[in-house]
Image (spheres, helix red, strand yellow):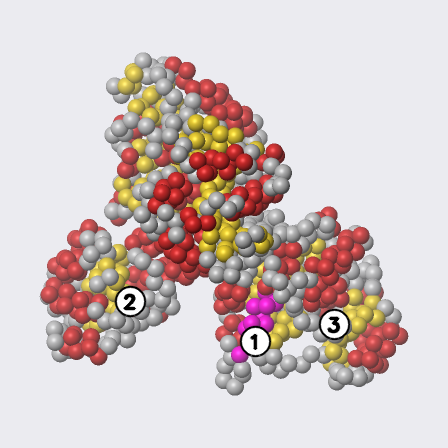
Amino acid sequence: MTIRNLDLALRPNSVAIVGASERSGSVGKVVLQNMRQARFAGAIYPVNPKYDELSGLRCYRQVPDLPAAPDLAVIMTPPQSVPDLIDELGKKGCKVAVVLTAGLTATNGLRKRMLDAAAPYLLRVIGPNTIGILSPTLGLNASFSHIAAPPGRLALLSQSGAIATTLIDWARAEGVGFSHVVSMGDMADVDVGDLVNLLARDQETAAILLYLESIPQPRKFLSAVRAAARSKPVVVVKPGRHAAAAKAAATHTGALAGADRVVDAALRRAGAVRVFDLQDLFAAAETIARFPPAAAPRLAVVTNGGGAGVLAIDQLIDENIPIAELSDATIAALDATLPATWSRANPVDIIGDAPPERYRAAIDAVAADPGVDAILAMNCPTGLASPEAAAHAVADAVTNGLIGGKPIFACWLGEYAARGARTVLQEAGVASFDTPAQAAQAVGFLSRWTRLQAKLRRVPESRNDAISGEAIARPIFVAVAAEGRTMLTEPEAKVVIKAYGIPVPELIVAATLQEVETAATKLLETAPRIVVKLLSKAISHKSDIGGVALDLQTPGDAAAAARAMLERVASTRPEAAIDGFALQPMIRRGRAVELIAGVNCDPSFGPTILFGAGGISVEVVDDTAIGLVPLDEVLAGDLIDRTRVSRLLAGYRDRPAADRNAIIGALNGLSQLIVDFPCVKGVDINPLLADADGVIALDARIEIDPVRVLEKGPNPDLAIRPYPSGWERIVAGPYRIRPIRPIDAELYPRFLEKVTPEDIRLRFLSPIEVLSPEMMTRLTQLDYDRDMAFIALDEPSGELAAIARFSAEPDHQAAEFGVLVRSDLQGHGLGTLLMGQLLDYAKADGIERLYGLMLRENLGMIALSDALGFAHETDPVDPTLIRVGLALANWHGLP
């Protein structure tokens, strides 16, 4: 399931350098020199009409003169020439071009001309305005970088060419190597999502580093990052954290939901580790690519300097890393090998004169402790022992960066004395850092990445059957839109949120002062005090003009408060029409915490949910967290835990904890509201009171887009697609057909026991003895945007009976499918039923064509595809394969 035509960008067999030159100082000369010095093993075709030969290579006058279609073309000619060159390359058969030239903009029309020239040939364009592309392991340096990138296991994608060359320079000095470096430039065609998709399955890439100044096509980007992060770390630097605050918004949520906070929430949800400077980019990648997951590693410190050890402990605590408690057996083992003056605790201070043997003994003893998950080895230079000899002792104990199967980090302090020691440690594969702070932060990266990995397995459903407010909310939205309004009144908003499971107080609307007295009389029969609020469709924040009166004890007090509100509005907002007053009981919950819960629609990442400390000072306190819609119980809980107010909600002293499940229910109710209604632009519930008895919303406002009130959910603006729970059905057998879930990985081992090796070979086109846990994870943890899989479950045993899936190409026009039915259940029509469901879904999802590859001897699948209307032909590359395809415009469902 390939990324269309992009494979050749990273592994070309031939490269055309269009604009190659021998002119001193020219880009063409630097690129050609870099290609030659990198010792690229494939063919290099310089193209320039001014030369017959360059650097010992034949130079071709123009693209049509090339002896063969180059896999990759690098263009560095003037901007006006680029569109015609792209057309010539496309005609020649080239599939990927890297355009180094700047100046192809939307304003001058050259960008569009370039893309129009590429489109007929499906020629992919990287750039323009890039420094080029490097694949050091292949000997490819199609760039004008001032220095070659050393080979390694990290891939770098940078939107900035200057940052790319800076990182190459820094990495070379630090001994860090790259599998690929791509300067993405203006991303006119190939964008970061495409390249992350490509690198996700690149076997030579252990981790992906991103430097991004913007994120085009956010949904594709998140889909790509989520897929990649399940198999390898993705580390991101995204500058612009302190951009100007949002302009005046209709809701508090809109004011608080800054763009960078949304980016942070999106990256977290996608499983990417965000860092905030370039040095951390490598530290994070080197750490999390090297070690197995460890959510909260209990860490032990071994050091020859007590002060340095204590400093490290402080830093580790700042990173929320638990400090290991050494067992009695470990202390006894250390007593037997260390001087009597050792610390007898963690950190393990082995004294400043420690020889290499003492380091080795201490580290071995600590690594054997079952209460220790990771080790930090430290060294302070002294005149009594050699730092380099100590480094050799540690290095000799290490296997693949682990000691006793446990991660080890190193921090050799000093500059001059530690230089040789750090080289020893790096060559042994030990993660080495200059300061205790950097080492602690590296352990923190590992912990954070592990938590993100766990959250990636959560796939929220598009509907929670316990929350079904659509039938109640839609007529309200339609009525508001019919009046030309965008903002619901408070009573309307409260009806909507109540329909989604969020409790609200009893509320009575009064149109006149007399009705205020009547309503107050009724409420005071059961409530000791009441609240009167102004109702005006023109005034969103009532408290700003004194539109809220509390603690009213008599009907007369209520009427007087309402009369005073009318007078204030007449003097401060005479143009605002008054619609009446809302009366409700005065809610007194002395031990409740005031919260805010809201929704905002980000222009890039779509709907987001905000949660945090509420009340009238919400924007001053600014204790909030943001998450992407949709949520589930775990994601809602994570949102709560990322705020300071969560500590109050957990209870303290004699104050019991707030009802966490009720808060989660309110957040999930908001999430479902947004999934159901694309028209909702913003929501504020402030304050949302929370205590041990539950939650209650004292105020609410909802903003809508009237044009979209008739649109049905699920909301197409969601950056992360929800689990498509509406696509479940029972079929003959009986079998339950439903979309696959991450938990279904547990069903695979039993399923595969009942699939013959021959059926496995026919499905995967080659023999496979066992599916690795990583592969089962990839098969079951889909984001439902580009991939879809349906499973058939045997009722009532719940065993997996069959699977059908497709994976869409990045443009979402075509998708490749595959089917596997358990060997003992074949021949009963189950494959046909599953494929019918898959085809129905693909057509509804906008896929235009489904295709597949199958071995010529797979007669059962060929017969099934024929019966479903697929056309088939022999694969032009491999005659042992049959290629089948179906235009979904011709699919009208199973009979």
Circle 2 Cα neighbour tier, 10 Å, few/some/many (<14 / 14–19 / ≥20): many
Circle 3 Cα neighbour tier, 10 Å, few/some/many (<14 / 14–19 / ≥20): many
Q: Nearer the viewer, residue 294 or 549?
A: 294
Ranked by sequence position, the earlier of labels 1 and 2 is 2
Q: Position of residue 490 (x, y in %)?
A: 74, 65
Q: Amino acid at mark 1?
A: Asp
Q: Is residue 227 left or right of residue 366?
A: right
Residue denoted by label 1: 659
Residue at left 39%, top 43%? Answer: 759
Q: Nearer the viewer, residue 17 or 566?
A: 17
- What secondary structure prevails in the magenta region? helix
Residue at left 73%, top 66%? Answer: 495
In three-dimensional space, the C-alpha distance between marks 3 and 1, rounded to whole angstroms, equals 28 Å
Residue 94: mark: none
Residue denoted by label 2: 373
Query: Is the C-beta separation of discs 3 and 1 under 8 Å?
Result: no
Ranked by sequence position, the earlier of labels 3 and 1 is 3
Q: Position of residue 372 (x, y in %)?
A: 27, 69
Q: Is residue 201 above or below residue 669?
A: above
Q: Amino acid at mark 2?
A: Asp
Residue 548: mark: 3
In three-dimensional space, the C-alpha distance between marks 1 and 2, rounded to whole angstroms, equals 34 Å
> Which of the image's four quarters has the C terminus?
top right
Q: Which residues, given as a range, are shown in magenta?
A: 657-667
Q: Is residue 339 above or below residue 895?
A: below
Q: Amino acid at mark 3?
A: Val
Q: In front of the other: label 3 or label 1? A: 1
